[in-house]
Amino acid sequence: MLSILLLIPFLGTALLLLLPGDPPPGRMRAVAITVLSLQLLWSLRVLLAFDPGEGALQMVESLPWVDSIGLDYRLGIDGLSMPLVLVNAALTLVSAVCTRDISQRPRIYFALLLLISGAVNGAFLADNLLLFFLFYELELIPLWLLISIWGGADRAYAATKFLLFTAVSGVLILGAFLGLALFTGSVDFSLSPVLSDRLSMGSQLLLLGALLIGFGIKIPLVPFHTWLPDAHTQASTPVSVLLAGVLLKLGTYGLLRFGLGMFPEAWAVVAPWLAIWAAVSVLYGSLAAIAQRDMKRMVAFSSVGHMGYVLLAAASATPVSLLGAVFQMVSHGLISALLFLLVGIVYRKTGTRDLEVLRGLLNPERGLPFTGTLMILGVMASAGLPGMAGFISEFLVFRGSLPSYPLATLLCMVGSGLTAVYFLLLVNRAFFGRLAITPPTDPARDSRLDVRLAGVAPRETLTTLGLALGVVLLGLVPATLGHLSESTTALLAGLPSLVVASSGAGGLG
């Protein structure tokens, strides 16, 4: 059953590449949407067969592959990966639906979208370290191509920077996996049994350090975050949706699955420092977002801050905080996708994302009232207002982390408050006031009263509205996701020796 989640996008990729002749872009897009719709339907089929009461891996599929190096084709799914598989299926479909006319190499563009979706599924489902690494690396080149070919004016710089950072991430992760085999003298790369109990604490800390930096680059955490704003700024809107909503979650997922999951004793030792790292990332991301004039860069820096909440939850490693980490990954995926889509609509309609230029877009007659309304909803969700998905995730993270690391948690709460500040600046500057698009080169010029912005396309309206409804429903009915993941997060929090207090970790509290 799980293998079909790989076959659907990979076969779809082959189908697009092998279509005879030169089909128009619309047909390529239709094929991609059909394939991704099938993937979403099959993901829901897997969800129906999933047992939320079982915390361990389910529906395991195993096939020997290259026994000499420990590479087996082994898939499984649990409460940590199930929500992320659903998010991947939904947001990849959204990316394809919201892709406007692609005149330049549409066949390759949509094939790359499908290839990335299949690779992400494989990474979330892999129950073998080397298999995870293969899928983790498989999405690297396709995303680099999506930025470097269909990106903005400085796409070459942004794509190259992304490639270099992510390549280093892959090298560190592979080095940690191979180091595990070297130190234990075993080529068993399965996740069970975990072999870290045969390692000295020094070896565990060395391997865990490599994983922390490797996945920290992918998440990204300060100071490894610098590639993300550039990549988002130059990437097209659908690619930004995919990058923020799905691909960043490979880093947080890897941190929980492999860092916490494989090295619980070493994790307890470094947990106080991880809490400090989380607080620094949250505060830096929030303060950097306040300083931005470009709407897209502001949303990009907000991701740096919000991913820090996941690290705080992982450092605390309580059942409540880990459940909050899952909520944060899912809610951030939906909220960031919504915000990037709305920023993309503003850019297409006005030709700018500069907050010093835009005014009054909420104008009900000549502006973008629907876009502005959803933008207000999206920023409220990101700021953690009650009734929204962001509130549930942040509340669980803070509630689960406060007893272990009160100071770091309070600092992250300050970062949450700063989220409201920078998004309030965005909404106030761009959407309120008298409608105007005033070039900054002519500050003396008054508002252009003849501005009349074109309406939003139905496909953009439906996708943004769907994401907004998802954000609200997850905030109002959080038990759906909680029931799905709490058995797995409780099992992960109950790993042997993972008691933060026993490590003498009182550094932040």
Image: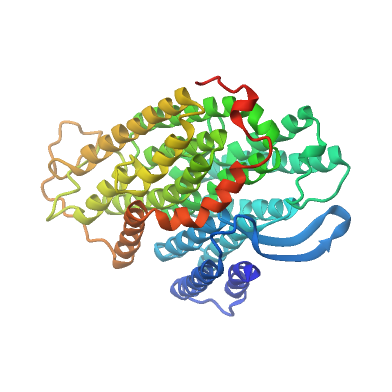
Q: Is residue 354 left or right of residue 315?
A: left
Q: Is residue 7 left or right of residue 394?
A: right
- In terms of depth relative to the viewer, which is nearer, 174 or 443? 174
- In terms of depth relative to the viewer, which is nearer, 27 or 295? 295
Q: Is 365 placed above or below 410 here?
A: below
Residue at 45 percent of width and 31 percent of height = 282
Residue 345 coordinates in the image, percent (x, y): 31, 54
Residue 218 coordinates in the image, percent (x, y): 58, 41
Q: Is residue 152 visible?
A: no
- In terms of depth relative to the viewer, which is nearer, 242 or 197? 197
Residue 146 coordinates in the image, percent (x, y): 53, 54
Q: Is 74 placed above or below 507 here?
A: below
Residue farthest toward the bottom in the current orientation of the protein: 20
What colour scheme has been applied to the protein in the rendered image? rainbow
Q: Answer with the quarter of the image where residue 432 lies.
A: top left
- In terms of depth relative to the viewer, which is nearer, 267 or 416? 267
Instruction: Give the quadrant of the N terminus.
Output: bottom right
Q: Is residue 186 visible?
A: yes
Residue at 20 percent of width and 39 percent of height = 438
Residue 160 coordinates in the image, percent (x, y): 59, 42
Q: Is 364 placed above or below 199 here?
A: below
Q: Answer with the quarter of the image where residue 366 lies.
A: bottom left
Give the total number of marks visible in the rendering. Answer: 0
